[in-house]
C-alpha cells in the first residue's frame, strides 16, 4: 500500500492492533510492554473499561452540538477540574498546543489591561509548548523552530531553574506580562527544578503583577504523584494548561485560570468548534473518576520511587549514565552520549520507550502498571543501557 501520509514522523516499523492495560499487541500478534503510554497520554493504559463504556454510552446519545449551546458534560468536567486544582474557570480545546495558545492570549490581554503596548511572556530554555506558530516560538528548541521563521514575537527566554534570571529580566524589561513554565520539563529531558523554584517564580510574578502560567500538559492528571505538579509547592498558578492524559487518548485540552485571569476572555475573544464536546468530556470525566477511585496519584508516587530506586541499583557504576531523574511516573535516564538507537533496540525486545533531548531515555508508563510490570521496565531498560555502553 502506497504511503499517502505527509512525512512528519520517523515511524518505527510496527503497527498496533489492540491493547490492554500496559500492554500492546501488534498486527502480527507480538506483545509489547508500553513504558511511554503514547507520550504520557494513556495514563489509564489501553482499553480501560471505564473510558470505553463512557465513549460507547455517549456516542449513542450525542457526539457534538456547538459551544453556542450549554454542554452539560463540559460543565461537569470543568467543575471537577476547578475543584481538584483550586482554579476558577476552564476553557476546553483539543490539544496541549491549543491550551497553551489560550494561555498566551490570556497573557497578552492581561498585558494590555496594564497598558503594556507590546506584552512579553518569559519562557524557558529547553521548554516545549507545542508546534503551532505561537507555541513553537515559545518553545526553547531551535531545531524544531528551524524553517518556520519569522517566529511569533513577544517571548523573552530565560534559563530554566534560574530565579536570578527572572529578576534580572524584571529590572530591564518592563513589558513582561507573564511567565510560562513547565513544573518539570518533559521534552527537555525530565528536568526537575529545585524544590523552591516554583514558589520563587510565584513571588516574582506577584511582585511585578505578572501572570504565573504553568504548562502541565505532561505533568498533570497524577503523572508526578499529585493531581498537578504545582501541588508539591504550596503555591497556585494564575493559569494552567492540560491535555495528554486528560482524555486517555481522546483529543482534549484545557486552559484553567483563577482570579482576574479567569475573567479576561469574553464572548468573541476566543472560541473553538470541537473543544469540550460531549464525547471528549465524557471520556475525561471517566478518567477523573477512575483516578480518584483507584488513588492512582498516590500509586504513581510509590511506583515512581520504586522504579528510581531500581534504576539506581541496576545502573550503579555505569560510567556512561550521567543522571537518573524522576518525579512520580515521569522518569529520565541521561546518558553521556546520544542514545536514540535504544528505541528500536527496545522495540525488538518488546518494550516501548522514548529518547528525548538526544540522550535522555524518557519513561512515562501508564499509571495502572503493576509492581511486576514496573520491575520489568526497570530490568529491561537497564539491560539495554548496559548493552549500549558495551557496544560503544
Image (cartoon, rainbow, N blue to C red):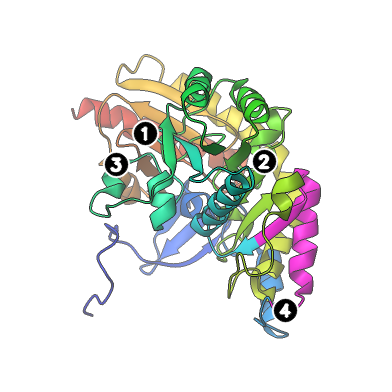
Secondary structure beneath label 2: loop
Where does the N terminus fall, quadrant-wise?
A: bottom left
Q: Earlier in the sequence, mark 2 or mark 1?
A: 2
Determine the residue positioned at 63% across, 57% down. 254
Picture disc at residue 57: 4
Contact (CB < 8 A) between labels 4 and 1?
no
Q: Few, some or many C-alpha atoms within 10 Å of disc 1 (few <14, some 14-19, many ≥20)? A: many
Q: Nearer the viewer, mark 3 or mark 4?
A: 3
User: Distance between the Cα atoms at labels 3 and 2?
Assistant: 28 Å
Q: Few, some or many C-alpha atoms within 10 Å of disc 4 (few <14, some 14-19, many ≥20)? A: few
Using residue 234 as the reference point, say whether residue 241 is left or right of it: left
- Give the magenta range: 68-91
Evaluate whether residue 234 shows in this view.
Answer: yes
Picture disc at residue 228: 2
Q: Earlier in the sequence, mark 4 or mark 1?
A: 4
Picture disc at residue 360: 1
User: Distance between the Cα atoms at labels 4 and 1?
Assistant: 41 Å
Is residue 306 located in the magenta-colored stretch of the structure?
no
Q: Earlier in the sequence, mark 3 or mark 2?
A: 3
Location of residue 168 in the rendering, given as x and y in whole percent from the top left corner: 48, 20
Location of residue 282 in the rendering, given as x and y in whole percent from the top left corner: 71, 69
User: Distance between the Cα atoms at labels 3 and 4?
Assistant: 44 Å
Quickly name the residue at label 3. 142
Secondary structure beneath label 3: helix
Given residues 201 and 33, the one toward you in this image is: 201
Q: Nearer the viewer, mark 3 or mark 2?
A: 3
Amino acid at each position: 500500500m502506497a504511503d499517502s501520509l505527509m512525512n512528519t514522523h520517523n515511524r518505527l516499523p510496527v503497527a498496533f492492533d489492540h491493547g490492554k492495560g500496559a500492554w500492546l499487541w501488534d498486527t502480527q500478534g507480538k506483545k509489547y510492554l508500553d513504558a511511554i503510554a503514547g507520550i504520557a497520554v494513556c495514563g489509564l493504559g489501553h482499553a480501560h473499561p471505564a473510558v470505553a463504556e463512557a465513549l460507547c454510552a455517549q456516542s449513542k446519545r450525542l457526539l457534538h452540538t456547538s459551544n453556542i449551546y450549554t454542554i452539560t458534560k463540559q460543565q461537569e468536567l470543568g467543575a471537577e477540574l476547578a475543584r481538584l486544582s483550586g482554579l476558577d474557570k476552564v476553557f476546553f480545546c483539543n490539544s496541549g498546543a491549543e491550551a497553551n495558545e489560550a494561555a498566551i492570549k490570556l497573557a497578552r490581554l492581561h498585558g494590555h489591561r496594564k497598558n503594556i503596548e507590546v506584552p512579553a511572556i518569559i519562557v524557558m530554555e529547553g521548554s516545549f509548548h507545542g508546534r503551532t506558530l505561537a507555541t513553537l516560538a515559545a518553545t526553547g528548541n531551535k531545531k524544531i523552530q528551524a524553517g518556520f521563521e519569522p517566529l511569533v514575537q513577544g517571548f523573552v527566554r530565560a534559563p530554566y531553574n534560574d530565579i536570578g534570571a527572572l529578576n534580572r529580566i524584571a529590572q530591564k524589561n518592563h513589558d513582561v506580562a507573564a511567565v510560562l513554565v513547565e513544573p518539570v520539563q518533559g521534552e527537555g529531558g525530565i528536568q526537575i527544578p529545585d524544590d523552591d523554584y516554583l514558589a520563587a517564580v510565584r513571588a516574582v510574578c506577584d511582585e511585578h503583577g505578572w501572570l504565573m502560567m504553568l504548562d502541565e500538559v505532561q505533568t498533570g492528571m497524577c503523572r508526578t504523584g499529585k493531581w498537578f505538579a504545582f501541588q508539591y509547592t504550596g503555591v497556585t498558578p494564575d493559569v494552567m494548561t492540560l491535555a495528554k492524559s486528560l482524555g486517555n487518548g481522546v483529543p482534549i485540552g484545557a486552559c484553567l485560570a483563577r482570579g482576574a485571569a479567569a475573567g479576561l476572555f469574553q464572548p468573541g475573544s476566543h472560541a473553538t468548534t470541537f473543544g469540550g464536546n460531549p464525547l471528549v468530556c465524557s471520556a475525561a470525566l471517566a478518567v477523573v473518576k477512575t483516578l480518584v477511585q483507584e488513588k492512582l496519584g498516590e500509586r504513581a508516587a510509590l511506583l515512581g520511587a520504586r522504579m528510581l530506586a531500581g534504576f539506581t541499583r541496576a545502573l550503579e557504576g555505569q560510567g556512561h549514565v550521567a543522571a537518573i531523574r524522576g518525579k512520580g511516573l515521569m522518569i529520565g535516564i541521561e546518558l553521556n552520549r546520544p542514545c536514540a538507537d535504544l528505541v528500536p533496540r527496545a522495540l525488538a525486545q518488546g518494550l516501548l520507550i522514548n529518547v528525548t533531548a538526544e540522550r535522555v531515555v524518557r519513561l512515562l508508563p501508564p499509571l495502572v502498571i503493576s509492581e511486576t510490570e514496573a520491575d520489568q521496565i526497570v530490568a529491561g531498560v537497564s539491560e539495554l543501557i548496559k548493552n549500549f555502553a558495551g557496544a560503544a
